[in-house]
Amino acid sequence: MKPTTALDVTVQAQILELLEVLRNETGMGLLIITHDLGVVADIADRVVVMHNGCVVETGNADQVYHSPQHAYTKKLISAAPGNGLMSDSDMSAKPILKIQNISKEYSGCKALDSVSFDLLEGESIAIVGESGSGKSTTAKLLMGLEDASGGRALYMGKDIFTLSKKEMKSIRRDIQMVFQDPSQSLNPRMSIFQIISEPWIIHPDILPKSQWEERVIALLEQVGLSAEHRHRYPHQFSGGQRQRIAIARALAVEPRIIVCDEAVSALDVSIQAQVIDLLANLQKELKISFIFIAHDLPVVKDFADRVIVMRLGKIVEIGTVRQIFENPTQPYTQALLNASLDPDPRVQSVRRAERIALSAS
Ligand SMILES: Nc1ncnc2c1ncn2[C@@H]1O[C@H](COP(=O)(O)OP(=O)(O)OP(=O)(O)O)[C@@H](O)[C@H]1O
Ligand SMILES: [Mg+2]
């Protein structure tokens, strides 16, 4: 059941390979339950589409993907990531964050090794790479959740690694984070109103109390929820809705930068597409810059302006989304792209053949 959801692409490909080999050798049947259409395209012969507890469509993988019959199947397939147009990046904007040679050592082991990149105003930069490549460590250093072992991170010209507590507090406001699992970042004992307005207690200069109610409602509406949701508690929402609440809370302090660490990885495809749309709209409307950490390359392709590929704590390649997806220069990037799963069973069967040929050579 969802055996590969939380895994990075290369490990996911290996597990699917293994299941395939076991199936061929033993003749066993394989029932895969997943929200990932790429997994379906890669391994399934037949597909059963379920909606609200009922089977709405069955067929072979190719039929279901290329000529879906039921309205729900059509919606699911059009929501599959990677089907959108890649953005042509505007590289003329000014850097808002300059990351220079940042490193992090954990008891002798280098989790990050001299990583440098600029984040431009209004840009979304994605960080991809295998598990353990240093993606979350990069985020943690920028958020001040861990101390850097070396390097600088200049925000509006000031190094955030050497700020005083007071200066850090004001920068905290400008750089917000959205995590993978919103149920861990939302206090279950607080109402949605309390959760979204809490940052205004910490930063009293943002908004007078008399305006909190109105602003909470506006924020809920901005993320696609409604006014009466403010009286509810986190457990009364779905995963996608909880992620919207976490985004509303991040927006409450009017940040300039949002760091998303696997923020949509736990959501199913149609909800994922909705949250990505929401983030893309916020980026356009509010000119917020994003650092978007993800192991799902098709999602990155839809959302990012530029992509950073990391491996073993170092940057392997950095380029516009178009360069990385169409002309990757590094073999590691190529391997990562080959290991990622396309929702189209035809594309996937070609990719699988290439992958097998590559590992045989
Ligand atoms: N608190 C810690 N103590 C010791 N080592 C750590 C700690 N946090 C991370 N590491 C190590 O640092 C390296 C990078 O970890 P990091 O969490 O940044 O990877 P990641 O790219 O986010 O991986 P994933 O895709 O699995 O989330 C790993 O080798 C990890 O084991
Ligand atoms: Mg991580």
Image (cartoon, rainbow, N blue to C red):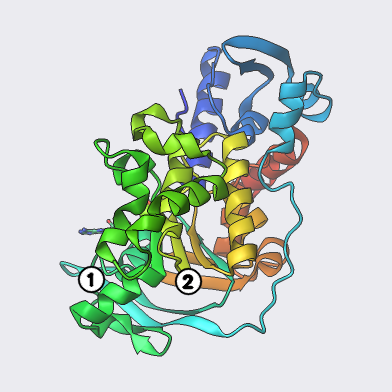
Ligand 2 within 8 Å of the CB at mark 2: no
Outermost residue to the front = 210
Residue nearest the viewer, comparing 280 with 3: 280
The residue to which callout 2 is attached is 256
Residue 63 position within the rendered picture, expressed as x and y whole percent measured from the top left: 80, 22
- The picture places residue 355, in percent across and down from the top left corner, at 63, 46
State whether residue 165 is above or below residue 12: below
In terms of secondary structure, where does tag 1 sit? strand
Q: Which of 32 and 338 is in front in this view?
A: 32
On screen, residue 99 versus residue 189, left or right, reads right
Q: In this view, does 2 lie above or below 91?
A: above
Query: Residue 139 appears in which quarter of the rendering?
Result: bottom left
Examine the rendering and report whether any part of residue 61 can be seen: no
Q: Which of marks 1 and 2 is in front?
A: 2
- x 72%, y 33%: residue: 77
Identity of the residue drawn at 48% across and 71% down: 256
- Give the quarter of the image for residue 279: bottom right
Residue visible at 27% across and 42% down in the picture: 187
Marks 1 and 2, how far apart at CA: 28 Å
Question: Looking at the rendered structure, which numbered label has been put on residue 105?
Answer: 1
Q: Residue furthest left?
A: 107
**Helix, strand or loop at mark 2:** loop
Quarter of image, ligand 2: bottom left
Quarter holding the N terminus?
top left
Q: Which of marks 1 and 2 is nearer the N terminus?
A: 1
What amino acid is found at the position of numbered circle 1 in the picture? Answer: Glu
Instruction: Tell me: 35 left or right of 11.
Output: right
Q: Where is residue 294 in the image (x, y as percent from the top left)?
A: 49, 53
In the rendered image, is residue 110 in sight? yes
Query: Is residue 71 left or right of 154 when viewed as pictured?
Result: right
